[in-house]
Image (cartoon, rainbow, N blue to C red):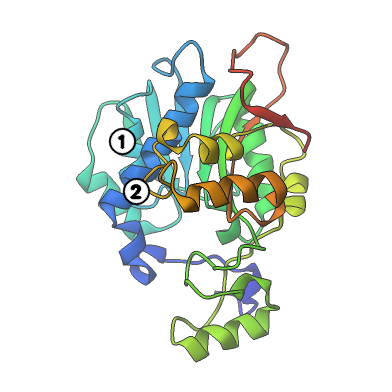
Amino acid sequence: MSPDHRNAYQHDYSKIRPESVFDGPSRLRKAGTILAVLQDHFLSGCRHLKLLDVGCSTGIIANFLAGYFHEVVGIDIDANAIWFARSTFRRPNLEFKLQDGLSLDFKEDALDLVVCAHVYEHVPDPDRLLSEIHRVLRPGGICYFAAGNRLAVREPHYGLPFLSYLPQEAANAYLRWSRRGSVYYEKHRTVWGLKRLVRRFTVVDYTHRLIQTPALFGFDYLLKAGTRRHRLAKFAVRHFYWLCPTYVWLLQKDAPPGRIPSRSTADSISA
């Protein structure tokens, strides 16, 4: 591995963070939200669509989605995770590949859908990742993009406050002091940085809708409607959007109007 950790991959992530990637119930809840958002967006249904799950890890989410899509391919650089996925999940329309998201082995305009959920902060070149996703999507194709925010107070991978705010060396020292790691690999961006990252796409923002109506998108495991926390979250997303811990966007590769119908109730934003 390169000594410059800022530009290095996190290899063997499933061995480093097994409590995360092998957590079936948590992964299935996330898969349910992904499916609910995509089903809400596509008026004509999803059964005929080919989907790529970038950073599929142990394959739990990809296997779930294979029950609703025509074909699902999951890719990851983690050999241990791909071995687990291949040996655990078998469907005729499901395939797992050991593959780098920065160099996708798909032809241009080959895919209807890409799922890229909380992956960008783990790769050494997120701009190239999004460029590759744009290349392999067909015109009008969609990328489900869930992205953490650098300005989130609690860093989601280590649970440490303000970790993602810090320069590299200070973040590494903070991890060592907390005994939760030695190198902070994740590189989160602010909402403005994320908008620059996805600038080649048209963005449909589902963040507001997930918070407004969490039960509709299977998001109520995190946010129960009508609670004090729910009321606070609705206020925060309306007035302090730049502080949201996570954004859920659908990224559309531009196509002539009418190629892929979608609901107009979601908010379109200019990237």
User: Element at badge 1?
Assistant: helix
* Discs 1, 2 touching: Cβ within 8 Å: yes
192 left or right of 253 in image: right
- For image coordinates 46% across by 66% down, the residue present is 11
Quadrant location of residue 218?
top left
- For image coordinates 38% across by 20% down, the residue present is 70
Can you give x and y, in whole percent of width and height, for residue 58 in the image? 33, 51
Dot label at residue 34: none
**For this rendering, which residue is in front, 215 or 8?**
215
| Residue behind mark 1 | 64
Can you give x and y, in whole percent of width and height, for residue 206 in the image? 59, 35
| Residue 105 visible from this viewpoint | no
Which image quarter is the N terminus in? Answer: bottom right
Dot label at residue 27: 2
- Assess disc 1: are there few (<14), some (14-19) or many (≥20) residues with their C-alpha within 10 Å of its C-alpha: some
Give the spatial CA distance, label 1 vs label 2. Answer: 9 Å
